[in-house]
Image: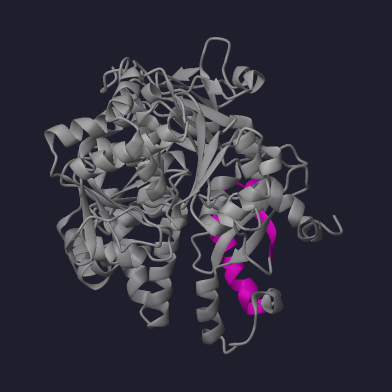
Amino acid sequence: MRRSGTTTRPAATPVESAGLADRVWDNAHRYPDAVQFLRPDADPGSWPVPRSAAEGAAEVTCRQFRDDVAALARGFTAAGVEPGTRVGLMSRTRYEWTLVDYALWAIGAVTVPVYDSASADQVRWMLADSGAVGCVVETAEHAALLAGLRDGLPELGHVWRIDSGDLIGLAERGRTVDEAVVRARRAAVSGGDLATIVYTSGTTGRPKGCVLTHRNIDLDVGNAVAVLPELFNEGASTVLFLPLAHAFARMVQVGMVRTRATMVHSAGMGGVRDQLRRYRPTFILAVPRVFERVYNSARQKADAGHQGWLFTAAEWTAVRYSRALDTASGPGPLMRLARRVADLLVYRKLRAALGGRCRIAIVGGAPLGERLGHFFRGAGVTALEGYGLTETSPALAVNRLSAMRIGTVGLPLPGVELAIADSGEVLARGDVVFPGYWNDPAATAETFTADGWFRTGDLGSLDDDGFLRLTGRTKEIMVTAAGKNVAPAPIEDRVRAHPLVSQCMLVGDGRPYLAALITIDPAAWSRWQAAHGRPDASVAQSRDDPALRGEIQAALDHANAAVSHAEAIKTFRILPDDFTEADGELTPTLKIKRDVVQRRRAAEIEALYRGH
């Protein structure tokens, strides 16, 4: 077993007598006028918005946030929410999500995040398994879904709907509760108390409830803040558009509150471009698929404007410049000049789409890949790739400006030790690792080794300097009929580099060769139609078109050039429609649910091997 080396001491002091909500009160006492949140125009039923400060955006200071949290905490107390009880939270990313989270923490209750896109079966399972006594939902649709499940949820006593003003009414009810009651409950919360049960979005099987304590989360966030001071500081800001039900976004939420940085909640990708231009964040966080879309969109626009050659040259320059940064001599004079020219013509437009001030991004959820990492750094937006799991609060490792190696997910955070098992699986231990799964001792025992290491389920390697490189998931490794082990993710990443490709999923487990299911990017498709004079043709009608198949074959040839013959994709099938979260084929963070795709697309897969 290869280890990451000597474990560094945690940068954060372990929390033994304080809960996460204490930071809200500390901020209000020491920095009452610091702007903690900017709130866009309020939606119906929203929590009351303070007087607008500028351009229609309401400033929420640390004092105001403390008052809001206290008011809602009193409301939950009046409704009978007790310390240790679980409350579901089903909503898109918005101010009320953060408000509910901290209000529950302030009285020692436990938040159970539920993706707003979750199915009825998933919602039933999460609320029943956690024993939730109440649930905050966002919309009438959510409330209707929950109403249909009430017979199977005997412990669920309350449902509060955000867009109908139920949280405002709850706070009004809380006026009957003395402030001293909340103060006493908050003082009673210790670091070892349960803060949240986060159900894994899961690409396979039924979601498991990850138990995380106040200490787990506080230590993880504190260590991340310590090694990423350029991101988490009082002058920093971000537009948060990932779902807060995901542990990655939740960590950033807590980090922003911890450092009094300013955060704007965005309900999703739909309006995020306008918000990026309006609020001009200093950093963003995203999953790799977001960066793939930014890249593909920029390339498609260049192609549509007959400037594809310019983008290709700028891309070549960005990658070469970024790679030169990692050499002892750095970029030479000619390379610096070429980059300045490319910056004027291409890169500035790309950065303008992120608001113009963003120079750093945190990337997690899946490997980004060297290609995009070098491109964005060369273009002036350094993507700091990190790694972790819900079970690890979530961050285990991250690249930093002071220690970065593109193609890896960075060095372990302080207090975290990583190791590589003989099987190639990444193992971890440290105070950020969760105590176990809720109501599932068998799964908990299975996920730890006999000597206490957490089994991540990921495959990887550690270089001589301790940087971690991921190569795949243990459950996703395919073994061909010839006995060749293949990790699909790196090959799929190279195929998705083609602007026309939305998703690529390899198949071939137990088969004579590897093949791929390909979906077409909807935005790129309209441009392809126009360029080929087929404005009315759908993907379903065109998937056997020689011109379209030729372009996809070029993407596969590019991917195959980087792997051995046994790992090469021999054939492919273009699907008539894209994978979607609504169909259950993608997780909320846009990862492919391979088992679902294999089941739903079984006929397409069989067609790839017909006659063999």
Front-lying residue, 210 or 286: 210
Residue 72 place in picture, x, y as percent: 36, 40
Residue 552 place in picture, x, y as percent: 60, 67
Outermost residue on the bottom side: it is: 533
- Can residue 407 be seen in this snapshot? no
Front-lying residue, 369 or 582: 582
Q: Residue at x 15, y 58 (%)?
A: 333
From which residue to which does the magenta span run?
546-574
Q: Is residue 579 left or right of residue 269?
A: right
Q: Residue at x 51, y 73 (%)?
A: 524
Residue 547: say if magenta. yes
Residue 323 place in picture, x, y as percent: 30, 49
Res 40 → quadrant:
bottom left
Outermost residue on the front side: it is: 176
Q: Quadrant of the C terminus?
A: bottom right
Tally of numbered tags:
0
Is residue 422 shown above or below 558? above
Outermost residue on the top side: it is: 451
Outermost residue on the right side: it is: 611
- Can residue 36 be seen in this snapshot? yes
Q: Identify the colour scheme used.
A: one colour
Res 462 → quadrant:
top left
Q: Is residue 315 left or right of residue 131?
A: left
Front-lying residue, 5 or 262: 262
Residue 174 place in picture, x, y as percent: 36, 38
Residue 394: say if magenta. no
